[in-house]
Image: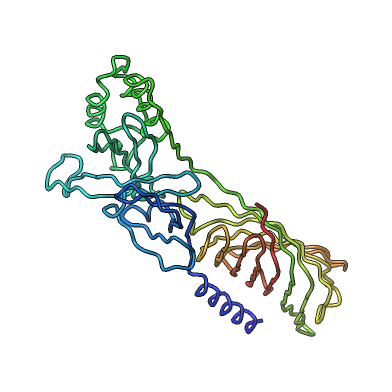
Amino acid sequence: MKKLFIICCLLLLRITCCFCIDMYEGGYIVTLQHDTIQGYVYFPSEDDIRSKIMFKKIQNETPALYTPENILAFGLNTGESFRSVTYTYYKKDDISEEGEQISEKCFARVLLDADYKLYRLTFAMVRNDFVYIIEKEDKFYVIRAAKDAVGDPTKKIAHKDIALLNYLLGTCSDMEVKTITNTKYEDAQMIKLLSQYSTCVLPDLNQQKYPSKMKLIVQPFVYAGYANIRYKTWLPEKTYSTNLAGYSLGAFLDLLIPRISKRNAVTIGAQYIRYEKKSGFRPDLNWNWSADFSLFYNFFLVNNDIHQLCLFLGWSGYYSHSSSDYGSSFYFPEPLPSVLGASYRYQNVGTRLTIGKVADATVLYWGLSYYFK
């Protein structure tokens, strides 16, 4: 079993080296001359593209690095758009605005394209750390969140930035001060506020909205393959080394939030294991079949529409059915993750290897999987 696992790991490592396409998605860049070039954009998560992106025209060419100084914008074929903006902050203290003022170019997500353009510049999706940037006539204004007692951002706009919004939107007589004050520090509310202003001052202007949602992608797949379980039991008169082999059929769900990260996902599922070959079992213990319930954390080495390669680690619990007087038993997962494996997918078809320890048993599954789209 150990030799088989090592061979599979080496094979998957070889596949990783061959498929260096990693997190590339279909998209485009807009050059400084306003030319649009179609190709593939490296986009693992919104955190990773603030200062640079990797882009290539075709899949098998060497990618080139682009910064916000090199291009005007880039986008994905999914409709997501990012532009080069100027972010201004103070080196020592953002709140009191003491110290040296710094301005740098960054890629920010486009939320609204109207009289005022609205962007969101993300620093860390997991911590919900971001700022809004408003553009008007090549000038950029930063809108920050108010801080709570311990300095964490809230869903309220910072007091000094409410004053800034009152100044920027004051030319619309229909825009009440309380409308700005009551606006929450979130995408939908900020888009609504600036869209309302644009409708007020330029009612005939065509507005383009790009609402961004924390969309959960659920990827179902089924599995069929070989199963092997080994364990030892000790009786006063003899030690039994039991080996059970057969087939397994399973159904799983990959749960992924791309806006946070395309490198990580959670897998939940269950599988049925039927034992066809048995050796070394106790006379009073005759397992016929088992049900496996699993929870895995996935780390993707490659993740796009064509290829997916990942390592996973997690827990499994078992319900085992016996035809003997011993009856059936449920084996709870270990306190620490005790099951690991690797999987590779090409388009809709893949292979999956799982090995680990559940209770006193060592388990191994290896088979094929089919992904529904």
Q: Which percent across, then down, holds residue 96?
A: 16, 39
Q: Which percent across, then down, holds residue 13?
A: 53, 76
Q: Residue at x 81, y 67 (%)?
A: 274
The quarter of the displayed image where residue 116 is located: top left
Q: Which percent across, then down, holds residue 32?
A: 29, 50
Q: Is residue 249 left or right of residue 20?
A: right
Instruction: Please determine whether, in this image, residue 138 is positioned above or below residue 243.
Output: above
Instruction: Please determine whether, in this image, residue 36 is positioned above or below residue 291.
Output: above
Task: State the residue lying farthest toward the left.
Answer: 99
Closer to us: 24 or 242: 24
Q: Residue at x 33, y 32 (%)?
A: 156
Image quarter where the N terminus lies is: bottom right
Closer to us: 120 or 158: 120
Colour scheme employed for the rendering of this structure: rainbow
Q: Is residue 263 left or right of residue 4?
A: left
The quarter of the displayed image where residue 161 is located: top left
